[in-house]
Amino acid sequence: MLRCTSGIGPAEHLGDMGIPVLQDTPVGENLQDHFGVFNNYLVPLHDSLLRVNRQPLYFIWEVLRYFLFGTGVLLAPVVQMAIFACTALLDKHGVPLEDKQPEINSVPDVEIMPLAYAQGLAQKDATRGGFSFLTVLLTPESKGSVRLRNIDPRAAPRIDFNYLSTLSDRMRMRHALRLVLRLARGLREQGYQLEPAEAPPLDAEVVGDDTLDRQITEQGCTTYHYTSTCALGSVVGNDLVVKGTRNLRVADASVFPEVPACHLQAPVVAVAEKCANMILSIH
Ligand SMILES: Cc1cc2nc3c(=O)[nH]c(=O)nc-3n(C[C@H](O)[C@H](O)[C@H](O)COP(=O)(O)OP(=O)(O)OC[C@H]3O[C@@H](n4cnc5c(N)ncnc54)[C@H](O)[C@@H]3O)c2cc1C
């Protein structure tokens, strides 16, 4: 947004704000993110990281384990595994299509993260713990924008994520949520004591689109993977210099032309190292 208040941005928007245009460029457009939806369940307390909050003696024991032996749940990351799937290979109930093979070079378009933790209602039941599946759309088509609220560079910008605004994005999220319902039901059928707290009923075959859409509205959230508002090609060139300027470079998540289908820290570090090498090679 500093770029926009300095006159580098979409001419029409800068004009609306009364900012003289130095460079007309689509800074702030093309915003992407990995949109996620939680399905929250109640599970036995001893299987959930919420136990650390609920049982002070258990917490003290885990602190001791951590300091004395370097082991225990305090070493457990909230995300311990992830499931990657291609929604094109699932039918409308989330069941893999047997006659369909993945195309060469096709990337998974959804990520499902089982978490030994849950927010919301699961935290209100003192006797049980929380567990959730976080379902994330990795290759969204939907695009939003970041705009100035006013000309004060310290003012919070106006952000429109425009999540799931294409039919394909919404349908892929529904397919993925049905796969999650099948996973949850599979756990229950194997005897695990899992009960929906803030999640649709476990029966993926009978859950309608409206139920899934309600889940998306009530439990949808960012996964903090904002990208693409200074995209390579449109705003910056291959040297990461903002087009129309001489020495102004951008080296962060905003230069990805579209959000990568992965977690972003490693790609951002790669961009930063590439940028540093390019600057060193010039000077
Ligand atoms: C809660 C959370 C969890 C995440 N977990 C993961 C994960 O597990 N794995 C993963 O791969 N990715 C994860 N990410 C995503 C990843 O951290 C980001 O995609 C990545 O850090 C983006 O890098 P960036 O350089 O674009 O922005 P940032 O890392 O946000 O860097 C921007 C920097 O600019 C500084 N800054 C801002 N304004 C100014 C100013 N006016 N003047 C000077 N400096 C300024 C900020 O202090 C900050 O240091 C997570 C993100 C969040 C928020």
Image (cartoon, rainbow, N blue to C red):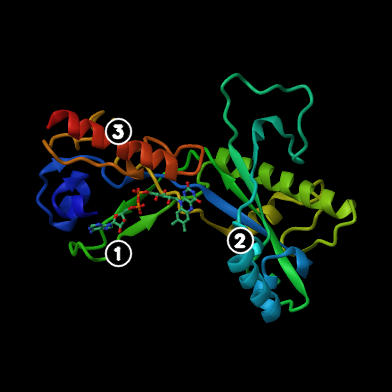
Mark 1 in CB contact with mark 3 (< 8 angstroms): no
Nearer the camera: disc 1 or disc 3: 3
**Which residue is depicted at the point 61% across and 71% down?**
63
Query: Quick one: label 2 or label 1, which is nearer the N terminus?
Result: 2
Q: Is residue 239 left or right of residue 247?
A: right
Whether tag 2 and tag 3 are in contact, CB under 8 A, the answer is: no
Q: Label 2 vs label 3: CA separation?
A: 37 Å
The reply to whether residue 231 is visible in this rendering is no
Q: Earlier in the sequence, mark 1 or mark 3?
A: 1
Q: Considering only order in the chain, which callout, 3 or 2, is on the residue closer to the N terminus?
A: 2
- SS at mark 1 in the image: loop
Residue 274 - label = 3
Q: CA distance from mark 1 to mark 3?
A: 30 Å
Q: Secondary structure at mark 2?
A: loop
Above or below 12: residue 139 = above
Percent from the top left, x then y, of residue 124?
A: 69, 77
Residue 186 visible in the snapshot: yes
The residue to which callout 2 is attached is 70
- Look at label 3 and name its amino acid: Lys
- Frontmost of labels 2 and 3 is 2
Is 249 above or below relative to 204?
above
The spot of residue 77 in percent (x, y) is 59, 56
Neighbour tally class for label 1: few under 14, some 14-19, many 20 plus, Cα within 10 Å: few
- Residue name at image x 60 percent, y 40 percent: 110
Mark 3: secondary structure: helix
In the rendered view, does 24 fall on the left or right side of 274? left
x and y percent of residue 217 in the render?
Answer: 59, 59
Mark whose residue sits in front, 2 or 1? 2
Residue named by callout 1: 156
Report x, y in % for residue 89: 69, 30
Name the residue at 65% across, 31% down.
Answer: 88
